[in-house]
Image (cartoon, grey):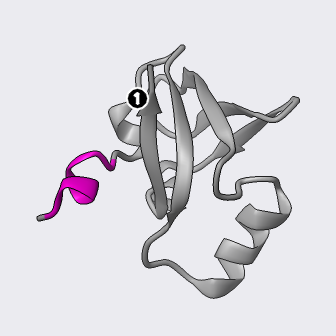
């Protein structure tokens, strides 16, 4: 594992109120990636985890100027880096 990989996290690693920068995607269906891109989840954008449902799924994130609800399984393809 290189240093870059050691800094990668997923949405599941964040707690409500924490922010992360989108670095890219890994795995996943190309059509779903296209949907995420269309919703503003592009490289360099900072998102904030707002809420996690009581059973852990879905999660609500703030992206740009809106809130977005994502299933955890679908959000796992996001490569993130924690913003301090």
Residue 20 drawn at (x, y percent): 51, 34
Residue 82 drawn at (x, y percent): 42, 32
* Residue at which label 1 appears: 14
Q: Is residue 61 above or below residue 29?
A: above
Q: Is residue 45 above or below residue 26?
A: above
Residue at figure coordinates x 19%, y 54% from the top left: 3
Query: In the picture, which quadrant includes the C terminus?
Result: top left
Residue 43 versus residue 16: which sits nearer the camera? 43
Q: Is residue 78 above or below residue 49?
A: below
Residue at figure coordinates x 55%, y 41% from the top left: 21
Residue 7 drawn at (x, y percent): 28, 45
**Farthest left residue in view:** 1
Residue at figure coordinates x 25%, y 58% from the top left: 5
**Magenta region includes residue 4:** yes
Query: In the picture, which quadrant includes the N terminus?
Result: bottom left
**Farthest bottom residue in view:** 30
Residue 61 versus residue 80: which sits nearer the camera? 80
**Farthest top residue in view:** 17
> What crowding class fits label 1: few (fewer than 14 Cα within 10 Å), some (14-19), or many (20 or more)?
some
Which residues make up the magenta segment?
2-8
């Amino acid at each position: 594992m290189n240093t870059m990989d050691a800094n990668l996290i997923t949405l599941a690693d964040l707690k409500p109120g924490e922010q992360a920068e989108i670095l890219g995607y890994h795995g996943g269906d190309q059509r779903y990636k296209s949907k995420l891109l269309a919703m503003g989840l592009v490289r360099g954008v900072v998102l904030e985890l707002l809420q996690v449902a009581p059973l852990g799924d879905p999660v609500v994130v703030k992206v740009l100027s809106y809130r977005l609800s994502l299933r955890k399984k679908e959000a796992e393809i996001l490569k993130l880096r924690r913003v301090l």
